[in-house]
Image (spheres, grey):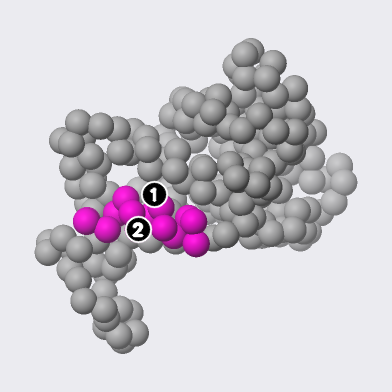
Amino acid sequence: MTELGDDTQAAMCYPSSRQYEQWKTRAEERGYDSVSRFIIDMVEAGSKQMDISVEDVALSHPSIKKWYPSLGTAAAVSDYENALYIPSREEREGNKSHRSRILPLDDEAKRVLIQFLQTRPSVDSQYLIVSERTYEPMDDSEHISAVWKDHFEAINRAPEFEDYRSIRSHYGRNFFTNYWKIQQDIPRELVQYMRGDKLGKSTSGEAIDDYLAAYYEDIRDLYLDCVFKLL
């Protein structure tokens, strides 16, 4: 695919789910789990834009919890199993979300996180994702772009998708939104909650706790029943 000018790029269709499905099929035909490798690569390439602490991840896995005593100890998820707390940008510098949120961890996410935590460098760091070289938080967003490019370049250049934009890192958020809002047709405010968008007036203290718990209870079963599968 040749480089396109801004006007041509703007006129192209957004990435299609068929691009992902064909990539997944090709990965399966090659005889190795490229889909799983992609997810793990994304976790390992984390950046400050996904500045997650170990305490933000609640996992029902005794061995992992023994290795990581602070796992799932954040107040927002301390009463839950298999959930992830994502702080707002006001609570933690570097995050993009306007509002904090709790999302369930389905079996697929749990499996990848457990695999990652079993091989994570054994360092005393609050951050879930650390550099294997410096043991510091990953803060280079180019790592994420490189992972997407490495895994999707062949599909992006496929002739049948020449009228579509390339799948890049921003595609994940767009796909997530369209999947829940259009394909699953769930209430708008629930999609906004899962994205971390603003919902009404800002709140603080106990009101935030009530807000998090209420919306999490609303989405938990729906999310686990309907979440799309990558593997």
Q: For residue 159, what is the image quadrant?
A: bottom left
Task: Name the residue located 24 percent from the left edge and 61 percent from the top edge.
Answer: 156
Q: Nearer the viewer, residue 79 or 165?
A: 165
Residue 202, horizontal then vertical, whole percent: 78, 58
Give me the disc on residue 179: 1
Task: Name the residue located 47 percent from the left edge and 46 percent from the top edge.
Answer: 42
Give me the disc on residue 149: 2
- Categorize mark 2 by other alpha carbons within 10 Å: few (<14), some (14-19), many (20+): some
Give me the disc on residue 94: none
Q: Nearer the viewer, residue 5 or 181?
A: 5
Quadrant containing the N terminus is: bottom left
Mark 2 and 1 residues: CB-CB less than 8 Å, in contact? Answer: no
> Would residue 112 be found to the left or right of residue 34 on screen?
right
* Residue 150 on the magenta segment: yes
Q: Nearer the viewer, residue 231 or 123?
A: 123
Q: Secondary structure at mark 1?
A: helix
Amino acid at dot 1:
Tyr
Q: Nearer the viewer, residue 209 or 160?
A: 160
Viewer can see residue 229: no
Q: Earlier in the sequence, mark 2 or mark 1?
A: 2
Task: Name the residue located 27 percent from the left edge and 49 percent from the top edge.
Answer: 20
Instruction: Kindly report the secondary structure that dominates the magenta region of the rendered protein.
Output: helix
- Gap between marks 2 and 1 measured at Cα: 22 Å
Amino acid at dot 2:
Lys
Specify the segment rendered in magenta: 142-155
Task: Name the residue located 74 percent from the left edge and 43 percent from the top edge.
Answer: 211
Residue 36, horizontal then vertical, whole percent: 37, 35
Vertical position of residue 8 compared to residue 91: above or below: below
> Would residue 18 be found to the left or right of residue 184 on screen?
left
Residue 62, horizontal then vertical, whole percent: 64, 13
Q: Secondary structure at mark 2?
A: helix
- Categorize mark 1 by other alpha carbons within 10 Å: few (<14), some (14-19), many (20+): some
